[in-house]
Image (cartoon, rainbow, N blue to C red):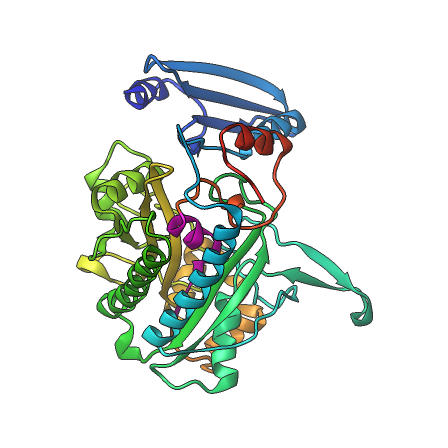
Amino acid sequence: MWMQKYKKISRFLTFKRFLYQTEEYFYYYFEKTNRNYTNILFFFPTKQKQVSILFLSLPSNLIEVILNKFMSYLITPEGYKPLLDLKQTELGIKQIKEFFQLNLSSELRLRRVTAPLFVLKGMGINDDLNGVERAVTFPIKDLGDAKAEVVHSLAKWKRLTLAEYHIEPGYGIYTDMNAIRADEELGNLHSLYVDQWDWERVITAEDRNVEFLKEIVTRIYAAMVRTEYMVYEMYPQIKPCLPQKLHFIHAEELRQLYPDLEPKCREHAICKKYGAVFIIGIGCKLSDGKKHDGRAPDYDDYTSKGLNDLPGLNGDLLLWDHILQRSIELSSMGIRVDKEALLRQLKEEGEEERLELYFHKRLMNDTLPLSIGGGIGQSRLCMFYLRKAHIGEIQASIWPEDMRKECKEHNIHLI
């Protein structure tokens, strides 16, 4: 396997240990040697299962242009043919969204609330996701050009809203969240435009354990299974494929199960085996000192002890997509930080200065309820149910022109 050959080569490298992967197409290292130049080393797999290596040492601004060219990705399933025409697709999207959100609200006892598209910058309310994404900002004339940010998600805003609405334990809220993520890698599963159901539910201190997390995740998955059967009744050509039971595994257990694979490839392997998987402990450091994936330190609790005494009360729900032949993440959720977890995670990331922000002060002053919450991708869910190859077949967005052209050549009709 070409990755094994890559590992042998990597022992002789003097580069920093920053390994990046763009889907399954290539891996690359990079390090800035000084202000103006960057070294970059690409590893390309070939059809003969060999490895091709390309070394570049170029001006940093030019390297950025090259990397941005590879930021977008496209998977073109061989022989792909949509099962539904445009009219059927639009009707299916409408029915799925209405049916699923009704089931979600019933399962978790949630009431709908209206959500903001943007929030004031500097309040600590917007979510940092992996901690590196840039928010879309703009000045507000009537507020003295104070900056507003288009939301990434509403994890912290929802918790503030629970307090404002005086929601009791066992009940919660959900909302239609629309966002713009300017730094997203565009492709089959990623768009500049994000639409998801954001939900949050008040819990008690006794609920802050992994068994309660699994109970909530199982309820959400049950709503997903029911929705898939509704789609089958509506369009019999779309056969149900979701397993009745969701498989739970911790990110550390997953790493030990597939030690030679990178995190994304581990997700593909476990999802192909079980069909539907919830990976616990996203954001915590594993035994090799790395994280399975990043999480901002101030909403999900990824350090408190959970499954099999491993850290993490959060995770990602992934399904195996038979069209793309890979796993897709449909939901990220978790029990939110309490005061102790917030302090611990901010210290671990060296971001204690966030404690001076509005949201964090509210949490430290015990004026916010304990909660569990998450987001569920609407377009991705519809894409999965309707057996589409590209999220652009579900939603209208901006795509690179070469991607549009290639999609058209492979019978993928972007809206």
Q: How many discs appear?
A: 0
Give coordinates of residue 72: x percent, y percent: 54, 34
Is residue 356 placed above or below 312 in the rendered structure?
below
Give coordinates of residue 259: x percent, y percent: 24, 35
Is residue 274 placed above or below 298 in the rendered structure?
above
Residue 150 is left or right of residue 21, and the answer is right
Q: Residue at x 62, y 35 (%)?
A: 400
Give coordinates of residue 246: x percent, y percent: 23, 56
Q: Residue at x 55, y 17 (%)?
A: 56
Q: Residue at x 35, y 54 (%)?
A: 316
Question: In the rendered structure, does residue 248 fall within the stretch colored magenta?
Answer: no
Residue extent of the magenta highlight? 372-386
Question: In the rendered structure, does residue 384 fall within the stretch colored magenta?
Answer: yes
Is residue 158 placed above or below 56 in the rendered structure?
below
Q: Quadrant of the C terminus?
A: top right
Q: Residue furthest left?
A: 308
Q: Quadrant of the N terminus?
A: top left
Q: Residue at x 76, y 61 (%)?
A: 139
Is residue 165 placed above or below 390 in the rendered structure?
below
- Residue in front for this viewpoint, 128 or 269: 269
Residue 269, can we see it? yes
In which quadrant of the rendered view does residue 201 lie?
bottom left
Residue 298, can we see it? no
In which quadrant of the rendered view does residue 335 lie?
bottom left
- Residue in front for this viewpoint, 380 or 131: 380
